[in-house]
Image (cartoon, rainbow, N blue to C red):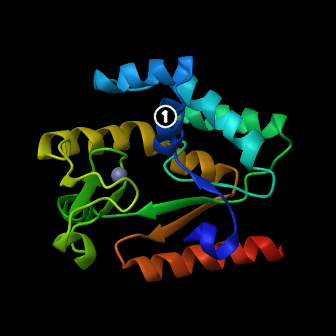
């Protein structure tokens, strides 16, 4: 939605890793191997790929979705941006209650082939659970059982939560109530981006 409205490219570590994997580069093969084992790709690799992506696509603004997730990643991003002489304008903190997280994940479908994710309540996909990008089958995410979710939530508390004060300290943090519907959340985000563009 941000790309459509503002022409700003958006990416996420997941998208960048999938792309590298699909390209079949030596690094891509290494990533595929780690992911097949169910492991986590190291911060070092993610940060390197983020820097490459920024050099290619970040010239006229950019949005990262789900990055950084840890303080070391946030610090690496600051040094990358310093090297590229680029300012960080906004850090958007979408605050979502545990109940909302559980509800949304329970209602999510994911493509087994390409990772495309959508809501199970979307009529289009409820009727015909086929991926619009690759015709793969849309399924409930297999890793979304309660135990995994609990682990992720506690990881969020210990690793990601500290980013709020990190970004508050450099005055770029904006908290947004993410428990509302998409339109209301997007309206808030749009207003912040427009204010920045005018500044
Ligand atoms: Zn797909």
**Is residue 42 in view?**
no
Q: Residue furthest front?
A: 135
- The residue depicted at 54 percent of the width and 40 percent of the height is 16
Residue 188 in the image: state x and y as whole percent: 55, 78
Q: Going 24% across and 70% down the picture, which residue do you hit?
A: 125
Name the one closer to the observer, 101 or 48.
48
Can you say whether 55 is above or below 24 in the image? below
- Residue 64 percent across, percent down from the top left: 58, 51
Does residue 77 appear to the left or right of 67 in the view shown?
Answer: right
**Disc 1 packing (10 Å; few <14; some 14–19; many ≥20):** few
Which quarter of the picture shows residue 35? top left
Q: Quadrant of residue 155?
A: top left
Q: Secondary structure at mark 1?
A: helix
Q: Is residue 64 visible?
A: yes
Residue positioned most to the right: 85
Find disc 1 in the rendering and name its residue. Answer: 22
Residue located 69% across and 57% down the image: 171
Quadrant where the N terminus is found in the figure: bottom right
In this rendering, the answer to whether 64 lies above or below 151 is below
Q: Quadrant of residue 197?
A: bottom right
Q: Residue at x 45, y 24 (%)?
A: 31
- How many numbered marks have been drawn onto this rendered protein structure? 1
Going by the image, does 124 lie left or right of 29?
left
**Position in image of residue 63 (x %, y %):** 63, 56
In this rendering, position of residue 97 left or right of residue 3:
left
Is the CB of mark 1 within 8 Å of ligand 1?
A: no
The quadrant of the image that shows the C terminus is bottom right
| Residue 39, x across and y down, in percent | 33, 23
């Amino acid at each position: 939605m941000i790309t459509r409205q503002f022409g700003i490219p958006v990416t996420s570590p997941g998208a960048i890793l999938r792309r590298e994997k699909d390209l079949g580069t030596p690094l891509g093969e290494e990533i595929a191997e780690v992911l097949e084992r169910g492991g986590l790709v190291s911060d070092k690799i993610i940060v390197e790929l983020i820097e490459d992506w920024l050099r290619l696509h970040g010239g006229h603004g950019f949005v990262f979705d789900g990055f950084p997730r840890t303080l070391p990643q946030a610090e690496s991003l600051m040094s990358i941006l310093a090297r590229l002489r680029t300012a960080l304008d906004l850090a958007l903190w979408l605050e979502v209650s545990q109940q909302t997280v559980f509800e949304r994940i329970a209602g999510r479908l994911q493509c087994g082939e390409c990772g495309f994710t959508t809501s199970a309540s979307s009529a289009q996909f409820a009727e015909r659970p086929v991926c619009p990008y690759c015709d793969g089958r849309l399924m409930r995410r297999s890793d979304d059982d309660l135990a995994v979710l609990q682990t992720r939530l506690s990881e969020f508390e210990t690793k990601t939560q500290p980013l709020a004060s990190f970004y508050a300290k450099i005055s770029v943090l904006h908290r947004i109530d993410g428990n509302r519907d998409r339109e209301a959340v997007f309206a808030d985000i749009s207003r912040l981006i427009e204010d920045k563009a005018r500044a």
